[in-house]
Amino acid sequence: TQLLEQSPQFLSIQEGENLTVYCNSSSVFSSLQWYRQEPGEGPVLLVTVVTGGEVKKLKRLTFQFGDARKDSSLHITAAQPGDTGLYLCAGERTSGSRLTFGEGTQLTVNP
Amino acid sequence: NAGVTQTPKFRILKIGQSMTLQCTQDMNHNYMYWYRQDPGMGLKLIYYSVGAGITDKGEVPNGYNVSRSTTEDFPLRLELAAPSQTSVYFCASKHSNYGYTFGSGTRLTVV
């Protein structure tokens, strides 16, 4: 049983389009992190959200933590080819505990 | 700072051979982790350590061993390589309340 379910698994869009990636669970997390991974590299941390309902923005990327701290979303506005990569959500059940990863969303932005 | 350094980057092993994947970090992080990532999948935790001299099993520890004699180093040992251990291995470290820093990975093929 996957603790964190990401959707969609694959997403191919045109440059300039908007998109949303979802990360859902039946469990409560003390924090949720989003990573981006490019081929041949390790994941790179984008953001950490810790408060229910929290919204964080990173340029064209908007991250939201659900009120109940069971889910999160990543919204990208006006996607660019440079946004192409594997987006991973990961959660900590309690502060300082092990991180559990979702299976990722492979995003391709076509020029 | 170099961050998290993994060696080697690539390795081909024959079934039954053994090897050690090296991981070192220069950020004085207490927490260190080993993950494996299979194609198109998220990351599965193999072993982790909360400090020098302390290690514990993750989700998929069978066939692996670790040690943590210093804060900087966290080697992963494969004793009898099997085809099921073909994967990309990532080492990561973190300070207590921040996101993980990943190495660039070791791509292992067992034939």
Image: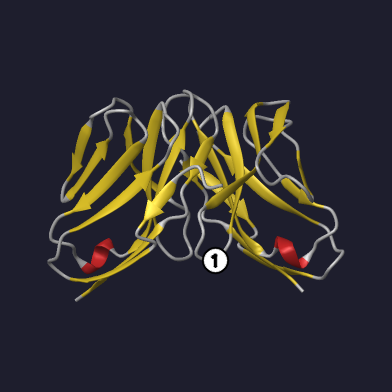
Q: Which residue is mark 1?
A: B39
Residue at 65 percent of width and 42 percent of height: B59
Pinpoint the chain carrying mark 1.
B
Q: Quadrant of residue A38?
A: bottom left
The type of residue carrying mark 1 is Pro
Q: Quadrant of residue A107?
A: bottom left
Q: Is residue B23 visible?
A: yes
Residue A102 location (% of width, % of height): 46, 49
Residue at 68 percent of width and 26 percent of height: B52
Crowding around mark 1 (Cα neighbors within 10 Å: few <14, some 14 to 19, many 20+) is few
Q: Residue furthest bottom?
A: A111
Q: Is residue B2 visible?
A: no
- In depth, the one of A40 and A85 nearer the eye is A85
Residue at 26 percent of width and 61 percent of height: A83
Q: Is residue B2 above or below residue B31?
A: below
In the visual, does A92 lie left or right of A77? Answer: right
